[in-house]
Structures are given as C-alpha cells and as structure tokens.
Image: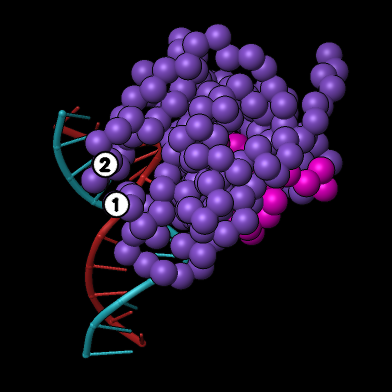
Chain colours: A purple, B red, C cyan
DNA sequence: CGCCAGATTGACT
DNA sequence: GTCAATCTGGCGG
C-alpha cells in the first residue's frame, strides 16, 4: 500500500485572509518527515487567528518574536507551548496585516504505527484529535518554530490533499475571550475532530 | 530575577 | 462536569 505524496502548497497559498486560508486548509495534508519515515494526516479542523485584535492570541499583549512572526512572512510555522503542550500554527494573512491558522486536528493517513508509539496510545481516534495531541503524534516541538511549510526540504510541509465534501464552522474552543464571529472550521461528520 | 497568564489534556467525582 | 499539572515568553522591579 503505497501512496504518492502530492505537491507542496506554494507560499502564496497563505497570502490571503486568515479565515479563508483556514477554510482552504481543510482536506490538505500535513506531512512530517521523522527519522526517515513519513508521518502524515489530513487536516480536518482549523482555527483562524488574528494579531493584535485577537484577545486569544499571545500577540495581543506582547510585541516580541511571536508578534513579529505573526505579522511577517506567510507560510511559516509557529510553534508555541501553552500548558506544557505544543501548538502548531501557520502564518497566513493578507499583505500588511497579521494573522495565522491553528491546526487543531488531523486524520492520520501515513505512519500511523509511528504515531501510536509517539503518543503511547492504540486508539487511532485519540492520535491527533487535538492541538497538543497532533504535535506529539508528529513529534513537533519548538525547534519547528519559523520553519517554512512550503519548501519541499522542510521536515514539515503542507501538501495538496482531498476534496472536502462539507465544511462546517463554529466558535472557537478553549479561548477565554473570543471574538464575536466563528473562526473555527472543520470537516463535517469527521470522526477525527477534537470536538463535535 | 520572579511573577503572571495562556490557544490543553486527562484523571477524578 | 470539575480541577490541577505543566512550560515558555513577556513584563515589572
């Protein structure tokens, strides 16, 4: 059973409104090269983030490296730790603006056995159905901060994937102060999202 | 240098 | 449903 990897998405894929990119990313494949193996999963849940105007973002109260990256070149990964877990984001926004997309959940398609080992669980639905979980399953840590996901040579890339039948949207999860518009996107009827 | 907040997870009642 | 653990960057003194 061999699957061929599709093309890596170009950088200008991320040069768009953060919410639009979040929606477009559904069905795409997050691909991670780990110890000569390939770990990959279909993106089934995302959240859009904005910069200063977003109370949930750390950039809201600070002006450091995270903010600069969020307002900088699109298509780069942002990896940040919260509550001792790692969250995997991609910078995506219009020119002269700031924002990003948080990958919240994947549907594993390659390297599943390796993911089970990394996560220490056997249940496939428990592998990547949460931001901290998918980072652990793909062995992502803060060394992935600022790597470009649009370069073939990167250890983590996002590639062309599958057509999504139905996209649903809702308010974000786990955010203390949310904006008044729904910025969470997910594949309807997927069993791999973090929450129904 | 110490303190605080934060986008989560998982175990327990 | 509720609650505590655990990590890092930013900010104040």
Tell me the residue at 53%/46% (across/down): A93
Residue at 56% over, 51% down: A95
Q: Position of residue A11 (x, y in %)?
A: 70, 44
Where's residue B13, x and y in %? 14, 32
- Foreground: A105 or A102? A102
Q: Is residue A148 magenta?
A: yes
The magenta stretch is A134-153
- Quadrant in the picture for residue A182: top left
Mark 2, secondary structure of its residue: loop
Asked whether, in this view, residue A186 is left or right of residue A31, the answer is: left
> Which residue has dot 2 on it?
A178
Q: Is residue A142 left or right of residue A45?
A: right
Res. A135 visible in picture: no
Q: Identify the mark at residue A160; answer none if there is no mark.
A: none
- Secondary structure of the residue carrying tag 1 is loop
Residue that appears at 68% across and 42% down: A12
Q: Badge 2: how crowded within 10 Å, few (<14), some, or many (20+)?
A: some
Q: What's the distance in space between the residues labelled 2 and 1, CA to CA?
A: 7 Å
């Amino acid at each position: 059973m061999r699957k061929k990897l599709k093309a890596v998405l170009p950088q200008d894929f991320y040069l768009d409104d953060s919410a639009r990119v979040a929606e477009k990313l559904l069905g795409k494949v997050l691909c991670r090269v780990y110890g000569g193996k390939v770990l990959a999963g279909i993106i089934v849940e995302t959240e859009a983030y904005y910069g200063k105007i977003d109370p949930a973002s750390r950039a809201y109260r600070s002006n450091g490296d995270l903010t600069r990256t969020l307002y900088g070149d699109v298509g780069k990964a942002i990896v940040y730790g919260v509550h001792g877990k790692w969250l995997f984001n991609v910078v995506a926004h219009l020119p002269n603006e700031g924002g990003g997309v948080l990958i919240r959940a994947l549907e594993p398609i390659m390297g599943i056995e390796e993911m089970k080992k990394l996560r220490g669980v056997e249940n496939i639905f428990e592998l990547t159905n949460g931001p901290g979980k998918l980072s652990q399953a793909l062995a992502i840590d803060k060394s992935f901060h600022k790597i470009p996901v649009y370069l073939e040579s990167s250890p983590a890339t996002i590639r062309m994937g599958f057509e999504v039948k139905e996209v649903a949207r809702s308010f974000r999860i786990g955010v203390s102060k949310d904006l008044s518009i729904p910025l969470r996107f997910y594949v309807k009827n997927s069993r791999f999202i973090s929450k129904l």
